[in-house]
Amino acid sequence: MIVVVDYGMGNLGTVAAKIKKMDTSVVITSNPEEISKADKLILPGVGSFKAGMENLRNRNLISILDKKVVGEKTPILGICLGMQLFTKKSEEGFVDGLGWIDAETIRFRFNDSQNGLKIPHMGWNTIKIKNSHPLFTNLGDQSRFYFVHSYHVLCEHPENIIAETEYGYLFPSAIVKENILGVQFHPERSHKYGIKLLKNFVER
């Protein structure tokens, strides 16, 4: 069973609908008891880092997620804000994150020659595979995904970066640490490429 964690932020229904088309059992819930039974977890997210952490805390979800992800090594996929919450801290609200990956979340910073670039980074963009991983099976460097974000992850260890994307400069667009996977883009809005990535996560 795959659980889409409901903490009040994100395209929960859209993500779950894509998973259901794969004939896979999926539920959307904030119930710790149901989360404890999950074979895999998905943490979507749209909005601010500070609000995301506050919602997880207010719904008493941090301890069960720590138990599942860190203790039991349950595979988890973070999407957009969900991925950013895996990091130690963020400049957005200057609050601590879940701390599962040695990384922080920072705002895009452009120099004078890049002033034509708008924030947020929004729309379709390609990825560059940096480290091979089953999440990107049959997905190459020309795969296109939909992005919408003003902040991005900065990893301390290059081995945690699966893929990068260029917007003014290269930033990590997919990260990994053991059972913990994150993508900055929205696979649920990325048509055939996003469907393939979600299918890889479900079947890996």
Image (spheres, rainbow, N blue to C red):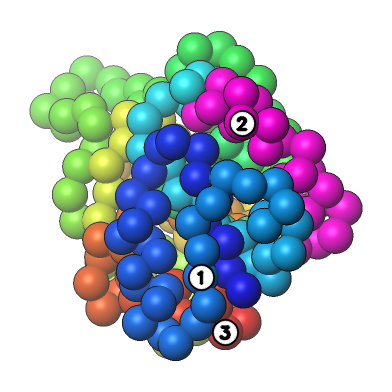
Quarter holding the N terminus is bottom right
Inspect this view and state whether residue 129 appears: yes
Name the mark on residue 203.
Answer: 3
Mark 1 crowd level (few <14, some 14–19, many ≥20, 10 Å Cα): many
Outermost residue toward the right? 71
Label 2, label 1: how far apart the Cα atoms are: 20 Å
Q: Amino acid at mark 3?
A: Glu
Marks 3 and 1, the one that precedes in the sequence? 1
The answer to if 70 sits in the magenta stretch is yes
Residue at 26%, 65% in the rendered image: 190
Residue type at the position of mark 2: Arg
Q: Which residue is mark 1?
A: 26
Image: 66 above or below 73 = above
Q: Residue at x 19, y 56 (%)?
A: 124
The residue sitting at 63% across, 47% down in the picture is 31
User: In which quarter of the view is residue 59 placed?
Assistant: top right
